[in-house]
Amino acid sequence: MKEIRIHARAGQGAITTASLLGYVYFLKGVYAYAFPSFGAARMGAPMNAFVRTDTLPVLLKSQIYEPDYIIIVDETLMRGFNCLSGLKEDGIVIINSKEGVDLALKPKQKVYTLAANDIALKNIGRPLGNTALLGAYAAATGEIGLDNLTEAIKKKFSGKIQDGNIAAIKEGYETVLKNKKG
Amino acid sequence: MFGPLVSKPGSSRNNKTGSWRAGLKPKFLRKNCIACKMCLLVCPEDCIRGEGKNTYDCDYAYCKGCGGCVKVCPKADIVMVKEEENSK
Amino acid sequence: MKEFLEGSIAVARVVKLCKPGVISAYPITPQTHIVEELAQIVANGELNSQFINVESEHSAASVVLGGSAAGVRVYTATSSQGLFYMSEVIFNIAGMRLPVVLTCANRAVSAPINIWNDHQDSISLRDAGWIQFYVENHQELADYHLMAYRLAEDKSVMLPAMVCMDGYTLTHAIDVLDMPTQEQVDKFLPSYKTSYKLDVDNPITMGPLADPDYYMEARYAIQETHKEVIKLIPKVTAEFSRVFGRSYNGLIEEYQVTDADKVIVAMGSVCGTIKEVINELRKKGKKVGLLKIVSYRPFPVSEIYESLKNVPKVGIIDRSLSLGSFAPLVSEIKAVFFGKNKKPAVISSFIVGLGGRDITKDSIRDVFGLMTSKEKACEFIDLKPELLKEEYE
């Protein structure tokens, strides 16, 4: 079982991201349970979305406290809140950040940052970095392939939005690959 | 299992409300009747019948003796009388 | 075919396959996605149904009552305060023996206002005469809607059915399920025919006055019919299994109960989390199990007795309260064993996850840990004592 926790603000598409990620796992032929945790249900309020995936049907319904992977859609969330709480010893964090961040990590934990909003602006025309972050997730974790992601996008979106998101995924993916090598 | 669930039309015929009268009953005088049908309309038991002037009467098996017809008659052609009195 | 769907969307699509002729509902969180999707389906022309917009839940329930009384299959959904606003009509629907199917997206009740999940709304209406199913996961929520229609509309039953699914945990979560096909549903669920309905050519009065000479028999009949439902559920699940290839008990589900010395009794989605914890504890050699109650109304008394009679320690998880008394599920389970020779030595009561407080693996481990030989009466799990210090004297 793998557990993924997404940190975002309401309105930033975290639920769509979680459902898309769950869908990618589903297309791969494994089980996935994707769910949001709503707070005040207002735009801008911090919120979480979660994905739990397994080769067997997912039984556990609780929120995720010890994630294998964390995706942070908005780095300003890290100002007052420990987004990394409970991260596994060998966990991976993907952060949407222009400047890069300095984190106190355990030896086996890894962090990858990318300017996902810039990638989204360039490819989609709106600063919604979710798909670029999923591309980065694929490269950082090796859990899913670029082909799985592209297939999911093709099934969920069409036309210009599809093309833009596929380009954003690729750029997110390649940014992290470069990071890994460098 | 169902028990009492729906009621079919006509069930009120089984309920002979004439026994409810408490000493008084309406008497249709048939003198000044103009066949306005007000008595027929106002009767809660729908037990008044008639065709044309001075023909109206009620079915005492159902008449509860409420006196509504007496109150509504514009010609005062219906009166309440003692139960024992001949109504014809 | 396997699909990856939000719980609410799955419900809407399954209801579509049942072809209700009248749908009416009023939006309330967390039920809203269900009727939004159904409204879209009807607007797209994919379902030939009257979707009737109303100004309140009371009206929504009244509309489906009327539709059902006219001999049409109907559907509605609601949550929490919405269910309470329907409640007057809810009792009427059962009393008039109309096979309405309603989805309750379970949510806590006010006050304090809370949109998150517990079972207080539907549990509070347990006495209304409706069949009540509590489902654990997406597959069950799809399948039990089909079985709800089939059971409710059976000529010997003619009672409404409520499918209770946990708000957010199921309504807003996306999971994998095998979606039934139209062909399968048509095979399992015949078109709705009733022997009494509002018909101008054959007029009847439905829901008339029943004075003291008649009323008790009408209520007795519903009580007796629930006994028939208990007998009918295994037949319906067997038929379901033949058509869809998925097997259910329909009344209860036993998970690792046979050799267990500690068994939790619970309803709804928390059963998934409990199973996960059981799997972990079993690996450590702990003999623990779960008895899931699926049919809360009718209450499967003899099935519960048979399942738990040899279990030494039983812990009941209630996700609702009967304020001022024992929690609803625990009082009923205890009643099952009163006066019996074989019974659990201890039946403890736990209150878990009210108003959406997350039920974690630790919460469930706590419950198992507290199931000692000393009986716990109404033990609240994950309570925050620091929030109880305010005083207004």
Image (cartoon, coloured by chain):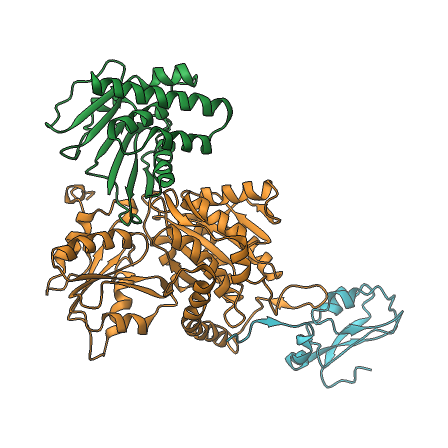
- Work out whether C260 lies above or below B21: above
Q: Is residue C272 above or below residue C194?
A: above
> Position of C386 compared to C302: left or right?
left
The mark tally for this picture is 0
Quadrant hosting residue B68:
bottom right
Q: Position of residue C108 (x, y in %)?
A: 34, 48
- Asked if A158 appears above or below B27 in the picture, the reply is above
Q: Is residue A147 above or below residue B79?
A: above
Which image quadrant is residue A147 in? top left
| Chain C palette colour | orange
Answer yes or no: is residue C249 visible: yes
Q: Nearer the viewer, residue C310 or C285?
A: C285
Q: Which chain is cyan?
A: B
| Quarter holding residue C246 | bottom left
Report the chain shown in green: A
* Residue A110 locus on image (x, y percent): 17, 26
Q: Which residue is depicted at the point 42% across and 65% down?
A: C237
* Residue for point 20% across, 18% down: A101
The answer to whether one can see residue A128 in this image is: no
Q: Which quadrant of the figure contains the C terminus of chain C?
A: top left
- Residue C324 position in % (x across, y down): 25, 59
Q: Residue at x 48, y 58 (%)?
A: C146
Near-viewer residue (A18 or A141) = A141
Q: As rendered, which of C217 and B77 lies closer to the eye?
A: C217
For residue C164, side relative to residue C204 (left or right): left
In the displayed structure image, the side of residue C195 where residue C321 appears, left or right: left
Q: Position of residue A32 (x, y in %)?
A: 33, 42
Q: In the image, A114: left or right of C238?
A: left
